[in-house]
Image: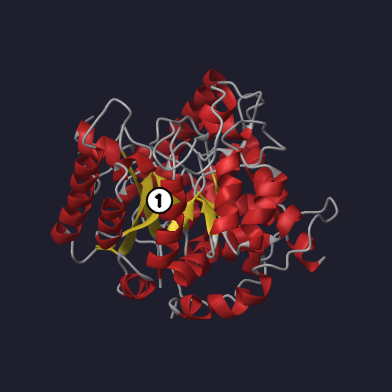
Amino acid sequence: MKILILAIIPALMLCNFACFSGKTDGTSGSQMQSQTDSTKQTDSNKVSNVTGKQDSTMNTNKYTDLNKDAFALHYDAIVIDTHNDILMPVFLQGADLNKDNPGTQSDIIKWKRGGLDIQMFSIYVPERFKSNHFSYVMKLIDKLEENETENPGSFALCRNYAELESGLRAGKFVGLLGGEGGNMIEGSMENLETLYSRGVRYLGLTWNTSNAIAISAKDETERGRAGGLTEFGKGVVKRMNELGMLIDVSHLGETAFWDVVELSNAPIIASHSNCYSLAPHYRNLTDEQIKAIAKSGGYIGINFYYKFLDPSGNQTAIKNAQSKYRNAANKFAGEYGDDLIGFNEKRYEYIINNPVNSGTSVDILIDHIDHIVKLVGVDYVGLGSDFDGSITTVNELYDATCYPIITKKLVERGYTEQDIRKILGGNFLRVFKQVCG
């Protein structure tokens, strides 16, 4: 059974937590490691949500020809996205999580067609809300719990590894909860504990604005605010360790980051961040920060937002490329019916034969994965798309049906089957089980 993968992840990766080797040579992939109308469907999403995944284990190479079987591998693997903001359009704009919404980058229909098994939902309070943040968050969680109640056979909102395992075994789409921005606890340790009791399993200590916990990356770099964790923030970090709640350092100022490294006795994650050395943006992680996260046994989810990937990116050029690729996929989607692998092969063939020489390519996203792997090893990186967070993604990843393109690109870079399974989901599963139980 596919669930066997879950049982052996910790054993496979235990030896890698704090013993990364530092920089390697310039090779990549396996070589690095061996050395508004919510009822309307868009045409390209008419491919069936029946993925036909088969179960496998991480210590067995199931596929002998990854170039031929890249998409089969993708739909066989456990795929996890550690950051998505779909709850905002669902809660505020009337989108339906269970329908193919033309105005969203993701929903359960798109996730299934893209091979996603587990989504970490971002619980976020929009900046225009100046008060009652905690109450707003409780309503967001209520909304997801209602969805589980209304869809008991297909959706499981999970709080720990055993529930996650059970949900996957039952063939359900699994939801996890993560908080984005410590302002939501309103300076109250009791509110933090309530978040945990409601199922929130990571908390991003800040968003772009600072709060009672810490100074944000944006405030530190663009607004000149000094400081790291507050005394209350230090208590929050310690309490999160005690509860079994992941500390998310995406959006956190660098001074506060190093305070967290010093204080935390558990793995640290960055749910949706990229590499500063490739794209010098305040939201990205320096090489020293990446090393510290890996040393903690943690995890970095690569963000799909073009501004965090490509300093020279042009939004208009990207949107033109996405329109071209989406429209082409719409035209031939009906030919493939339930055949998701065939659909993806056709879509990828079109992308390769009709290159766009502007915008920001998915290859740059793979460069960020490569950089982390070269620096600390393959065990600490995954996917944290930031879909539906008001972002423009890279050319080829126009919505959540496009995750298989990443797997194909990883194969082309020379990653092994086991490496790809780790990046797609195994690395986060290892951290989640260790910290959240």
Residue that protrudes farthest toward the right in the picture:
25
Instruction: Check disc 1 and report the residue beneath it.
Output: 203
Question: Residue 387 location in percent, x, y?
Answer: 42, 40
On the rendered structure, is 146 left or right of 429? left
* Neighbour tally class for label 1: few under 14, some 14-19, many 20 plus, Cα within 10 Å: many
Question: Residue 371 location in percent, x, y?
Answer: 72, 48
- State how the image is colored: secondary structure
Q: Residue at x 64, y 49 (%)?
A: 409
Q: Is residue 10 above or below residue 305?
A: below
**Where is residue 352, by image quadrant?**
top right
Q: Residue at x 39, y 72 (%)?
A: 161
Depth check, front residue: 400 or 435? 435
Q: Residue at x 54, y 75 (%)?
A: 9
Q: Amino acid at mark 1?
A: Leu
Q: Is residue 81 visible?
A: no
Q: Tag 1's secondary structure?
A: strand
| The N terminus: image quadrant | bottom left
Question: Residue 331 location in percent, x, y?
Answer: 42, 36
